[in-house]
Image: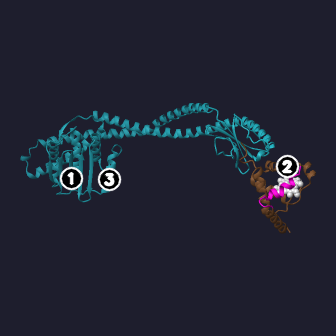
Chain colours: A cyan, B brown
């Protein structure tokens, strides 16, 4: 029953994940469009502000032009460019060459009529009479402090409200859209759950009953048949374990203990011995004593089982399996059909993205990857086509 | 004819040594006029603004002076009468105008 509950929460959390990633994307898009609108609004407001400034600046410019006129008439006696503490100014001839300037900025865009640059407002006007040869005059006044504060306040207020509203609407819309899908998924899940659950009892019944049979009392041909049944049941039992593990995911709380790996490997090899015999696979073991690991016994068993079962499954009849155990290293090599180097890479990729992809390389390897990740073990697959595969687990 | 005059002026230029065409040719005639030559310059500047424009307009006028194209007010032009076409070659005229411009330009003179 615990299994079922966890499976449920697992689904919920996945759904939540989708929901969140969608919401994130949605919010991001909303933000982009909001920024765009805000930008337009800001630009418009700035334009309005500049239009307001224009009148005052135009008056200042006329004052300056009058001074230039006086200077023009008296240029034989007077050479001092008229200055004003309220603004800086510059004059340019019709070839846009600077005649004189008190501006801070060197580059003035004479084609514009008013603009803001580096916290200064620039106003450009064309003269009717070119006093001192000046066709254009540019005025530079400091930008009034915080003139755009109000604009920003409006933008943040309304932007925030609209953003919150759209995200809220998006959330409810998505929930609405997801409902039929969720129903379908939970139907499927319930089916898988029930099936898995129903598998357990009959398989265990078969296995425990076979164990009760005394092989010595059987004639060889019946023993052979019984062995085949044992192998088949164990395969189903393994599959059941894998499914359960997947359903529980790594939500399953771990009961770590000190595990003697030599003993465990011997036990697992014994478990697979019948299967190996049936394929006439020779198993070689070179196991160092006293190599221990602090890990959940069930999980390390699952990990080893999956690698061993692959080694058997993909092996040739009469092939070999070599199991080595050294300090901080377990190596399981087989003489199976192997796979291309490019595919190992692929398997590794899947391994990294375990959570989302079950399949491809098989459930088994995904589970190996998940357990390895949980305990920080590194799993290295080395494979050559038609020569075999070598899986090394180090920590 | 024009060439001969041009040659004559070049000879004169030799005779007078380092003095520029402007000083030799324009200044003496303008010196005695009640309106000084710098006033003409600033009138041109007022109307044409840039160096190239001013020089172009002056060349045009000096080569072909008419009452209509003169920059002077009607009162003044009637008083002085339209001046005669310049006798200077293109090169000499442009040299004279260069000096004229350098003498009265506003660039680098403002403080």
Q: Which residues are magenta?
A: B16-33
Query: What residue is disc 3 on?
Result: A345
If the image is split into quadrants, where does the C terminus of chain A sit?
top left
Task: Give the residue at mark 2.
Answer: B36
Task: Tell me whether circle 1 and circle 3 mark residues in contact (CB < 8 Å).
Answer: no
Residue A4 part of the magenta-drawn span: no
Q: Residue A196 appears at what percent x and percent y?
A: 27, 40
Residue at horizontal 27%, vertical 49%? Answer: A380
Main secondary structure found in the magenta portion = helix
Pointers 2 and 1 within a single chain? no
Q: Chain of mark 2?
A: B
User: What residue lies at 80% left-to-right and 42% top-to-bottom?
Assistant: A74
Along the line of sight, the residue nearer the viewer: A247 or A193: A247
Label 3 chain ID: A
Tell me how far mark 1 sits from mark 3, CA to CA: 18 Å
Decide which of B18, A18 is in the foreground and name it.
B18
Q: Does the stretch in magenta take in B22?
A: yes
Q: Give coordinates of residue B7: x percent, y percent.
A: 82, 67
């Amino acid at each position: 029953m615990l299994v079922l509950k966890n499976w449920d929460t697992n689904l919920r959390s996945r759904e939540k994940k989708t929901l969140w990633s969608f919401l994130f994307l949605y919010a991001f898009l909303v933000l982009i469009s909001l920024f765009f609108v805000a930008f337009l609004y800001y630009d418009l407001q700035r334009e309005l502000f500049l239009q307001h400034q224009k009148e005052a600046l135009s008056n200042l410019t006329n004052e300056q032009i009058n001074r230039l006129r006086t200077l023009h008439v008296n240029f034989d006696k007077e050479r001092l460019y008229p200055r004003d503490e309220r603004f800086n100014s510059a004059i340019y001839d019709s070839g846009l060459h600077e005649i004189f300037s008190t501006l801070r900025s060197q580059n003035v865009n004479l084609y514009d009529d008013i603009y803001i640059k580096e916290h200064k407002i620039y106003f450009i006007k064309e003269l009717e009479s070119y006093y001192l040869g000046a066709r254009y005059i540019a005025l530079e006044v400091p930008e009034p402090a915080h003139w755009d504060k109000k604009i920003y306040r409006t933008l943040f207020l309304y932007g925030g409200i609209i953003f919150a509203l759209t995200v809220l609407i998006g959330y409810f819309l998505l929930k609405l859209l997801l409902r039929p899908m969720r129903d379908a998924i939970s139907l499927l899940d319930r089916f898988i759950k029930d099936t898995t659950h129903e598998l357990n009892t009959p398989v265990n019944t078969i296995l425990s009953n076979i164990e009760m049979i005394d092989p010595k009392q059987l004639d060889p041909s019946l023993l052979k048949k019984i062995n085949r049944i044992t192998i088949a049941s164990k395969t189903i039992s393994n599959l059941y374990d894998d499914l359960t593990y997947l359903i529980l995911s790594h939500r399953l709380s771990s009961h770590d203990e000190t595990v003697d790996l030599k003993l465990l490997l011997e036990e697992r090899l014994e478990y697979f011995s019948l299967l190996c015999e049936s394929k006439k696979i020779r198993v070689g073991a070179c196991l160092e004593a006293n190599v221990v690991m602090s890990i959940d016994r069930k999980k390390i068993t699952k990990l080893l089982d999956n690698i061993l079962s692959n080694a058997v499954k993909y092996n040739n009849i009469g092939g070999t399996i070599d199991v080595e155990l050294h300090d901080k290293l377990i190596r399981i090599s087989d003489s199976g059909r192997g796979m291309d180097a490019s595919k190992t890479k692929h398997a590794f990729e899947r391994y990294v993205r375990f959570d989302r992809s079950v399949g491809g390389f098989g459930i088994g390897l995904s589970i190996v990857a998940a357990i390895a990740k949980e305990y920080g073990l590194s799993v290295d697959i080395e494979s050559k086509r038609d020569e075999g595969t070598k899986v090394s687990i180090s920590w | 004819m024009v060439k001969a005059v041009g040659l004559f002026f070049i000879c004169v230029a030799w005779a007078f040594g380092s003095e520029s065409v402007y000083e030799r040719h324009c200044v003496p005639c303008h010196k005695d006029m009640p309106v000084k030559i710098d006033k003409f310059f600033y009138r041109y500047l007022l109307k044409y603004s840039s160096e190239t424009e001013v020089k172009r307009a002056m060349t045009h006028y000096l080569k072909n002076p008419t009452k209509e194209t003169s920059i002077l007010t009607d009162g003044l032009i009637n008083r002085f009468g339209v001046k005669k076409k310049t006798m200077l070659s293109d090169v000499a005229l442009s040299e004279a105008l260069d000096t004229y411009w350098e003498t009265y330009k506003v660039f680098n003179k403002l403080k």
